[in-house]
């Protein structure tokens, strides 16, 4: 039997892959990695290195070569159809929207910021304000001092940001700030009357068949630009493929090759990685990446005709995950078919299907399961925004009933030595405290959760599977008192919540 026939039997060459979201319809062909020059063992080596990186939680990994998926994992409780928030990966999408206006002749990189917001840019504040150009904002060299925290307290971000003196001459000093990208989003909306998302839906996403994208909005109804985009890993891969193909999609030039070349030209030379227009030059020669907090990546590798998507929550120093990708898969891809044993492909398929994040270890029951069954505790004011929590241990199930500060009730079922998915009534826990956060993002949201009893304490791990956050909670019962010891995956700082039985 020919190897190609065996491969067809093991991994369908036209696997129907939903890209997430109820209305998403685009499918991506999946092929055996050996058909595009990647050995299955190299993929599994990459998966293992990513899954064992600490402190890191891997949510989605997609490797595309020649526009086809050569390998992917979505460790349980995550699934391929789950969307993910991407933090500063958003910036690269915003730069593409800016490029559309430049292609249309509605904007140039030499246009002055004062052209769009003359009401705020005053000589008495700082005469240098009128010298800020669009290209200075694209390269994080506007001269403004970083003010990321202002989004947590201010309602009108543009007015607040533009009515401050500069700390450097425009175009001279690099200072990374997500509000810079927000200004680009605001300029796009000012010119077109459309949000960045509306423009990209019309000109980029819908022509590509991508319909699962949402984006957070500021209190004034402007797409946040520098963060807040929300879409599936497959849609991210398709966007990376568009950049790899220099804007050409199904024979149509969706965005000019010239603009993408400008985006992926080093405009700011830095000690670590050079910066283009809202995109980073990678360590690997000729490769670029959209890069978001906690390790969100869309990596474009022209030399290998490859796109790699990684969604995770990582607090690793030095970002070893990128090195793992380079050293296992990227360097070893030869871009032509290689011979492998059918057993290798079968092993890979089984790996990709079975991989999961670690569940908690301990006992399934405890004397407390009877004592506290059906009991409700009122929580002190806390960072989770939970008002009360009820414990149900009946019929072999462990369920946390949580009432949040908006009086929405969620029943979170916890699996024993397995992950169980539950639907939330409200929003997931979030690392960002910006005003209006989640505006523009629709639910429902889900948790994937497990539990174990250890030394009289109930331990729970809760992943917000179509977001990014997870919680490790330890419930310590003491009569009518409850203490919750918590850890968030995006910080190493633990927290404590006190509660009283009703």
Image (spheres, grey):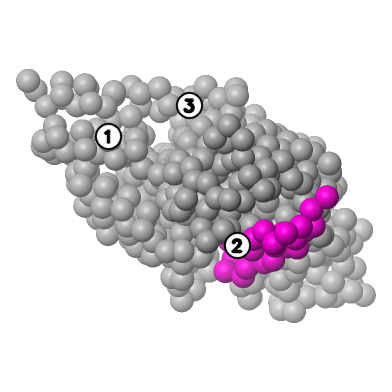
Q: Does residue 299 appear to the left or right of 171 in the view shown?
A: left
Image quarter (top left, top right, bottom left or bottom right) of the N terminus: top left
Q: Quadrant of residue 440?
A: top right
Identity of the residue drawn at 48% across and 42% down: 416
Percent position (x, y) of residue 95?
A: 60, 49
Q: Earlier in the sequence, mark 1 or mark 2?
A: 1
Identity of the residue drawn at 16% across and 38% down: 344
For label 3, count other residues whose C-alpha is less than 10 Å away and answer few (under 14), some (14-19) or many (20+).
some
Q: Does residue 183 appear to the left or right of 394 in the view shown?
A: right
Q: Does residue 380 appear to the left or right of 60 in the view shown?
A: right
Q: Which residue is mark 1?
A: 349
User: Would residue 492 be counted in the magenta stretch?
Assistant: yes
Q: Earlier in the sequence, mark 3 or mark 1?
A: 3
Query: What label sits on residue 487 in the rendered view?
Result: 2
Which residue is more in the foreground, 167 or 407?
407
Q: Which residue is mark 3?
A: 18
């Amino acid at each position: 039997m020919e190897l190609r026939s065996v491969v067809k039997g093991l991994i369908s060459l036209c696997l129907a892959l939903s890209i997430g979201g109820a209305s998403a319809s685009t499918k991506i062909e999946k092929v055996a990695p050996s058909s595009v020059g990647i050995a299955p063992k190299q993929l599994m080596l990459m998966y293992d290195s990513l899954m064992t990186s600490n402190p890191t939680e891997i949510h989605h990994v997609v490797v595309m070569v020649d526009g086809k998926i050569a390998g992917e994992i979505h460790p349980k409780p995550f699934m391929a159809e789950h969307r993910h928030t991407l933090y500063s990966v958003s910036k690269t999408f915003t730069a593409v929207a800016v490029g559309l206006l430049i292609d249309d002749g509605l904007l140039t990189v030499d246009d002055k910021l004062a052209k769009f917001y003359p009401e705020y840019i005053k000589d008495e504040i700082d005469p240098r304000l009128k010298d800020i150009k669009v290209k200075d904002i694209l390269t994080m060299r506007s001269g403004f001092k970083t003010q990321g925290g202002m989004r947590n307290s201010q309602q009108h971000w543009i007015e607040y940001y533009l009515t401050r003196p500069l700390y450097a001459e425009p175009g001279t000093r690099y200072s990374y700030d997500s509000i810079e990208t927000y200004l680009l989003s605001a300029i796009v909306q000012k010119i077109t009357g459309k949000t960045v998302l509306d423009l990209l839906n019309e000109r980029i996403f819908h022509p590509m068949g991508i319909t699962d994208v949402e984006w957070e909005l500021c209190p004034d109804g402007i797409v946040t630009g520098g963060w807040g985009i929300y879409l599936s890993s497959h849609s991210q891969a398709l966007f990376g493929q568009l950049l790899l193909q220099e804007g050409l999609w199904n024979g149509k030039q969706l965005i000019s090759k010239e603009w993408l070349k400008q985006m992926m030209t080093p405009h700011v030379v830095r000690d670590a990685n050079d910066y283009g227009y809202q995109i980073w030059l990678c360590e690997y020669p000729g490769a670029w990446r959209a890069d978001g907090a906690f390790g969100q990546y869309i990596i474009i590798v022209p030399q290998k005709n490859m796109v790699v998507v990684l969604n995770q929550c990582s607090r690793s120093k030095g970002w070893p995950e990128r090195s793992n990708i380079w050293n296992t898969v990227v360097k070893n891809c030869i871009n032509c078919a290689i011979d492998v044993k059918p057993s290798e492909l079968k092993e890979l398929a089984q790996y990709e299907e079975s991989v999961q994040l670690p569940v908690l270890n301990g006992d399934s029951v405890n004397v407390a399961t009877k004592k506290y069954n059906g009991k409700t505790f009122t929580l002190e004011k806390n960072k989770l925004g939970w008002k009360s929590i009820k414990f149900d241990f009946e019929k072999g199930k462990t369920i946390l009933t949580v009432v949040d500060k908006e009086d929405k009730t969620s029943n979170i079922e916890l699996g024993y030595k397995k992950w169980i998915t539950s639907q939330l009534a409200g929003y997931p826990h979030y690392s960002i405290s910006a005003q209006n956060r989640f505006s523009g993002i629709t639910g429902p949201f889900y948790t994937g959760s497990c539990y174990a009893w250890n030394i009289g304490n109930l331990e729970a791990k809760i992943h917000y599977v179509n977001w990014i956050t997870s919680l490790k909670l330890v419930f310590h019962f003491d009569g009518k008192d409850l203490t919750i010891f918590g850890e968030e995956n995006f910080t190493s700082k633990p927290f404590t919540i006190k509660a009283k039985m009703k």
